[in-house]
Amino acid sequence: MIILGIDPGTATTGYGLIKIKKKKTRKRRFECIDYGLIQTSPSLSLPERLKKINNELNKIIKKYQPELLAMEKLYFFRNTKTAIPVSQAEGVILLTAAKKKIPVDFFTPLQVKSMITNNGWAKKNEVQKKIKKILKIKENLKPDDVADALAIAVCSALRYYKVSRTSLKKKNKKKY
């Protein structure tokens, strides 16, 4: 299964793709496939910036064929000037996923930190260190949007496994 993690924004949208592999020992293993940024120029109008996000996201989806898209959920912003454009970027990302019939999973920053480090108040560098270890990445993940996108994808993979393992156990019990 391939999961596309997204950290939305109008200036920079981070993305990270991971693949879930099963080892012979039944342990899950996550492999980093790709990561990067979708950057838009401040000189572009908002509609042009949103169009670029849509176009670049379509290219990524076409190339990697993710089965699930996981995105950071906007839950609180002090600055409405920032919140509104981020919400618009989220809308474009959701529309792109819906057109491609890709289900979407949402995580707040607190959920990501809790799932990755077991500490909801962890600092960004703690999350980045843990993600690098989980995905066996040697280079630094910069900017933060990229590391956040990979962390969101890993959270979705962890949630997927919990759900699927539980449902498999229930199905097996019913059969016997």
Image (spheres, grey):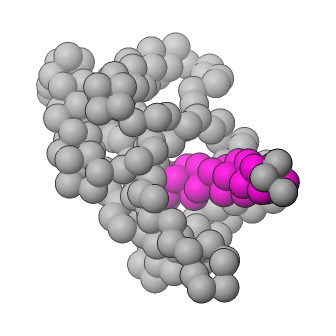
Residue positioned 52% across, 53% down in the render: 153
| In the displayed structure image, the side of residue 10 where residue 133 appears, left or right | right
Where does the image place residue 8, in percent across and percent down from the top left?
42, 35
Q: Along the line of sight, which residue is nearer the eye, 122 or 156?
A: 156
In the rendered image, the quadrant that contains the C terminus is bottom right
Give, as a single range, the part of the protein colored magenta.
Answer: 145-173
Location of residue 175 with respect to 130 vertically, above or below = above
The picture quadrant where one finds residue 42 is top left
Q: Along the line of sight, which residue is nearer the eye, 8 or 124?
A: 8
Location of residue 12 with respect to 54 vertically, above or below = below
| In the displayed structure image, the side of residue 111 where residue 32 appears, left or right | left
Q: Check if residue 156 falls in the magenta segment.
A: yes
Q: Check if residue 69 falls in the magenta segment.
A: no
Residue 124 visible in the displayed image: no
Residue positioned 50% across, 19% down in the render: 83
Where does the image place residue 66, in percent across and percent down from the top left?
36, 50
The picture quadrant where one finds residue 92 is top left
| In the displayed structure image, the side of residue 52 where residue 3 appears, left or right | right
Type of secondary structure dominating the magenta stretch? helix
Q: Along the line of sight, which residue is nearer the eye, 98 or 13?
A: 98
| In the displayed structure image, the side of residue 92 where residue 78 appears, left or right | right
Where does the image place residue 58, in percent across and percent down from the top left?
21, 39
Residue positioned 45% across, 59% down in the render: 1
Q: How many numbered marks, from 0 up?
A: 0
